[in-house]
C-alpha cells in the first residue's frame, strides 16, 4: 500500500511541474464486507472481498497527453491484498494521422465490448455467478501487445462515416526484440492469433460489430537439438485468445428512447490437435480426462449466444439478460467422445429510485445445465452422472449514492441444484466440497468509489 501511495504522490508532482502536457487521473475501487453467510449448520464471515475476487480492488489511473494531442501514455495501478502492481493499462500511444491510433504495451480497450453486464451481487446468487459484458462481445486486451484503431472514412463529413477497424497483435513466444529472437520462430504463428474486428454505427439505429479471434493453443514443436516434440504455445501477450479460432458478431439496438437491446454470438471453429489437452474436467468423484502428447483429438468448443436488454424510464430501471451455450464436443479420436449439454443462464434485475440518492432493487438469477454424455466403443453413449443441475437465487438490495461512490446492502439467497466440489490434484483429498443443496443466505455490503 505504501508503494501505491508513493506512485500517486510522484504522479501528482510530475503533473504539477510539467505544464507542457495535459494530465488527468481517475480512480475506481470496490470492497465487499459480508458479516454473515450461512448454509445448514455452517456459516462464515468475509471481511474484505470484491464482487469477483477474494480481496478488495483499489485502483488509480493516470493519463498524459502532449500539447499536440498526438502522443501520450496511460498507466494505472491497483492493490488487491498483495503488492501494489500495474493494473489493466500501461501503454504509450500515438496518433500520427487523424484516422490512425497505435498503442504499445498493456491495454484494455472497450470500444466494441458489450455494454450490458450483470448484477454486482451475482456471485452471491448463483454458484457460477453470471456473465459479464465480454460474453456479448469480447474486448481487446493484452498484457503486452500492439493495438491499432483505424477510422478509414474519417474524411467523410457525414453521419454515415461510423466505420472503424481495430486489431491487437501479440509477440512470438518468448518475447524479446524480433531481430534478436528469430531462430525457430514464424511470424505467421503470431498473426494467425490476431484479434481483429470492425464496428459500424448505423445512424439513429444502433452499433454493429464483428471480429475474428485467432487461436493460441499449444502445439508440438521440435526444438533445436531435440528429437522429442515440446508442447508450446506460439504467441504471448494477448489475453482473450482460446484454443479455437472464433468469429463473434454483436449488435446494439438503441433506436427506441429509454431502451437498449443487445445481441451477441460467438462461433468457435472445430479443430484437431496432437498436443495434450483436457477432454473433460473433474467431476466428483472422477478426475479430469486428459489426453497425452501425440494422441489425436478433435474439439468443438460450445457456441454461445447472449441477449440483454435495459429499459430505463425516469426512476425505474429493469435489466434482463439471457446467455445460452450449446454444441460443445471433445473427442480422442477412435477412443472416447464427450458431448456437453446445453447451459442456459437467465437474469432479471428491476430497480427503482425511491427518493434522491436511494435506490431499491431485486436481483433474480437462474442457471440450467443439461446432462453431458460419454461415448465409447465398448459402452456406447451413456449419460454422465452429476453433470446436470438447476440453480436458482434471488435477493433484494438497497443502495445509497454518496456522490463519487455508493454503498449497497443486499440479502441474497442461493439455491444450488447439486453438490459442488473443487478439484486440485496437489491436495489431499483432491476434491473439496464447496456447495451442498442447502440454501446459502448472505448479507453482502459493497462500497464502490468512482472518482
Image: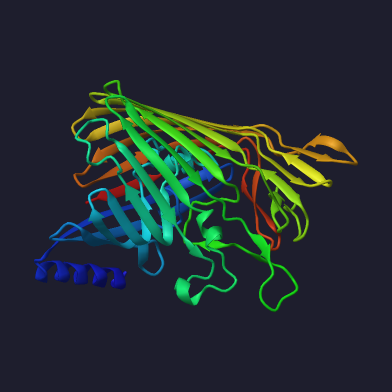
Q: How many marks?
A: 0
Q: Nearer the viewer, residue 21 or 309?
A: 21
Q: Nearer the viewer, residue 435 or 9?
A: 9
Compared across the picture, whether 428 is left or right of 149 comes to right
Compared across the picture, whether 25 is left or right of 383 comes to left
Task: Choose top left, top right, bottom left or bottom right for residue 112.
Answer: top left
Task: Tell which residue pokes out farthest to the top in this image.
Answer: 256
Q: Which of 114 and 197 is in front in this view?
A: 197
Q: Can residue 120 be seen in this view?
A: no
Q: Nearer the viewer, residue 143 or 360?
A: 143
Residue 38 percent across, percent down from the top left: 52, 44
Task: Tell which residue pokes out farthest to the bottom in this image.
Answer: 225
Residue 255 percent across, percent down from the top left: 30, 22
Residue 430 percent across, percent down from the top left: 70, 58
Residue 116 percent across, percent down from the top left: 38, 35
Task: Choose top left, top right, bottom left or bottom right for residue 18.
Answer: bottom left
Q: Quadrant of the N terminus?
A: bottom left
Task: Choose top left, top right, bottom left or bottom right for residue 274.
Answer: bottom right
Q: Can residue 254 be seen in this view?
A: yes
Compared across the picture, whether 205 is left or right of 186 comes to left
Q: Which residue is drawn at 32% across and 47% down?
A: 150
Amino acid at each position: 500500500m505504501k508503494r501505491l501511495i508513493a506512485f500517486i504522490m510522484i504522479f501528482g508532482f510530475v503533473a504539477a511541474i510539467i505544464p507542457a502536457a495535459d494530465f488527468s487521473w481517475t480512480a475506481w475501487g470496490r470492497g465487499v464486507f459480508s458479516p454473515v453467510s450461512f448454509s445448514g449448520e455452517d456459516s462464515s464471515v468475509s471481511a474484505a472481498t470484491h464482487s469477483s475476487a477474494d480481496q478488495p480492488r483499489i485502483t488509480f489511473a493516470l493519463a498524459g497527453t502532449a500539447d499536440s494531442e498526438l502522443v501520450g501514455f496511460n498507466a494505472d495501478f491497483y492493490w488487491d491484498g498483495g503488492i501494489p502492481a500495474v493494473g489493466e493499462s500501461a501503454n504509450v500511444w500515438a496518433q500520427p494521422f487523424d484516422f490512425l491510433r497505435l498503442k504499445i504495451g498493456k491495454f484494455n480497450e472497450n470500444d466494441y465490448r458489450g455494454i450490458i453486464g450483470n448484477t454486482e451481487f451475482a456471485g452471491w446468487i448463483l454458484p457460477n455467478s453470471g456473465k459479464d459484458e465480454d460474453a456479448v462481445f469480447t474486448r481487446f486486451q493484452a498484457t503486452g501487445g500492439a493495438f491499432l484503431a483505424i477510422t478509414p472514412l474519417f474524411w467523410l463529413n457525414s453521419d454515415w462515416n461510423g466505420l472503424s477497424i481495430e486489431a491487437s497483435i501479440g509477440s512470438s513466444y518468448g518475447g524479446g526484440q524480433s531481430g534478436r529472437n528469430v531462430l525457430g520462430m514464424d511470424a505467421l504463428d503470431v498473426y494467425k492469433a490476431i484479434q481483429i474486428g470492425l464496428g459500424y454505427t448505423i445512424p439513429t439505429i444502433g452499433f454493429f460489430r464483428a471480429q475474428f479471434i485467432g487461436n493460441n493453443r499449444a502445439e508440438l514443436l521440435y526444438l533445436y537439438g531435440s528429437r522429442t516434440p515440446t508442447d508450446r504455445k506460439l504467441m504471448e501477450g494477448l489475453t482473450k485468445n482460446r484454443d479455437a479460432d472464433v468469429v463473434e458478431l454483436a449488435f446494439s439496438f438503441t433506436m427506441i428512447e429509454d431502451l437498449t437491446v443487445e445481441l451477441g454470438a460467438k462461433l468457435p471453429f472445430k479443430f484437431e490437435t496432437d498436443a495434450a489437452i483436457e477432454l473433460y474436467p473433474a467431476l466428483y468423484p472422477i478426475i479430469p480426462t486428459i489426453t497425452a502428447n501425440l494422441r489425436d483429438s478433435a474439439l468443438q468448443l460450445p457456441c454461445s449466444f447472449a441477449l440483454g436488454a435495459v429499459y430505463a424510464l425516469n426512476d425505474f430501471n429493469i435489466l434482463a439478460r439471457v446467455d445460452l451455450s450449446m454444441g460443445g464436443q471433445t473427442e480422442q479420436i477412435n477412443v472416447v467422445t464427450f458431448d456437453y449439454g446445453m447451459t442456459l443462464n437467465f437474469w432479471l434485475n428491476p430497480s427503482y429510485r425511491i427518493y434522491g440518492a436511494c435506490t431499491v432493487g431485486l436481483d433474480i438469477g437462474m442457471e440450467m445445465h443439461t446432462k453431458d454424455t460419454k461415448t465409447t466403443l465398448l459402452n456406447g453413449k451413456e449419460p454422465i452422472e452429476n453433470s446436470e443441475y438447476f440453480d436458482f437465487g434471488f435477493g433484494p438490495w438497497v443502495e445509497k449514492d454518496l456522490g463519487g461512490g455508493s454503498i449497497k446492502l443486499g440479502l441474497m439467497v442461493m439455491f444450488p441444484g447439486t453438490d459442488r466440489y473443487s478439484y486440485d490434484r496437489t491436495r489431499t483429498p483432491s476434491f473439496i466440497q464447496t456447495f451442498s443443496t442447502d440454501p446459502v443466505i448472505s448479507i453482502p455490503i459493497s462500497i464502490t468509489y468512482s472518482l
